[in-house]
Image (cartoon, rainbow, N blue to C red):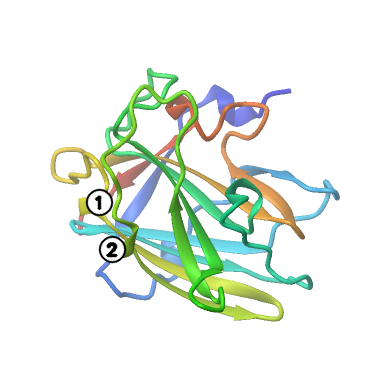
Amino acid sequence: MFAKSFLYRFRFPCQYAVTGAVLDETYQIPHFGQLESADSQAGFPYDFRIGWNETGLLFSLIVSEKIQSLWCRTTQPDDSDGIQICLDTRDIKDIHRASRFCHRLLFMPIGSGRDQSQPLALWLPIHRAREHPNSIDLSQISMMSKVSPKGYRLDVFLPGKILTGFDTSEHPNLGFHFALKDREHGNYYFLAAPPLPHDQDPSLWGTLTMERR
């Protein structure tokens, strides 16, 4: 059975933010997704916020109410705790196979550094893509994480210069989708969820509209 969101096109405002700024509640992405969990009545205790400026995108993610330890593995990125974000810098909705302007990135709160305690970003290929974007220099992504026994906070600055086609003056809309993975809480999908090809079909993604100051 398909999610009702499959029948609509969704646009969400993305507010302007200065690089390094703290994103308040006005930057929150609305909860309108589908949860896959062992307990279908359970919610996913998270807070996800996003902002933009001419130099890139800012994300802030908080996951709470955890008891189990984080599970983050570079060898099993699709199963790891963290957030996968899909972006289309052209926001084309009449194609079903990703173009060179489509990106899929994974951000994990731990997994990098000598003791694996630092946040990690990975580029993930999009299945059946017609063409992949230019090579992404992941070292230019700024990340900070704070892990506690009850959860974590992850802050990310994603420079537009490493995203193929990022140009907010000419293309003020971005195709946007995310999948929030957590072995304890389950998986939360923004708008489209399995069995739909949510992480490879740009026509299933929502739209972020870059709002000017």
**Relative image position of residue 138 (x, y in whole percent):** 34, 58
What residue is disc 1 on? 162
Instruction: Give the answer, above or below, for where 65 lies relative to 167.
Output: below
**Relative image position of residue 32 (x, y in whole percent):** 59, 44
**Relative image position of residue 148 (x, y in whole percent):** 64, 81
Q: Residue furthest left?
A: 169
Taking the spot 77% from the left edge, 60% from the top edge, the residue there is 184
What residue is disc 2 on? 140
Taking the spot 56% from the left edge, 22% from the top edge, the residue there is 7
- How many discs appear? 2
Task: Out of 128 and 94, give the one closest to the viewer.
Answer: 128
| Amino acid beneath label 2 | Gln
**Relative image position of residue 42 (x, y in whole percent):** 80, 54
Q: Residue furthest front?
A: 114
Taking the spot 42% from the left edge, 71% from the top edge, the residue there is 24
Task: Out of 114 and 208, give the one closest to the viewer.
Answer: 114
Q: Secondary structure at mark 1?
A: helix
Looking at marks 2 and 1 on the same chain, the residue that comes earlier in the sequence is marked by 2
The answer to whether marks 2 and 1 mark residues whose Cβ atoms lie closer than 8 Å is: yes
Q: Secondary structure at mark 2?
A: helix
| Amino acid beneath label 1 | Ile
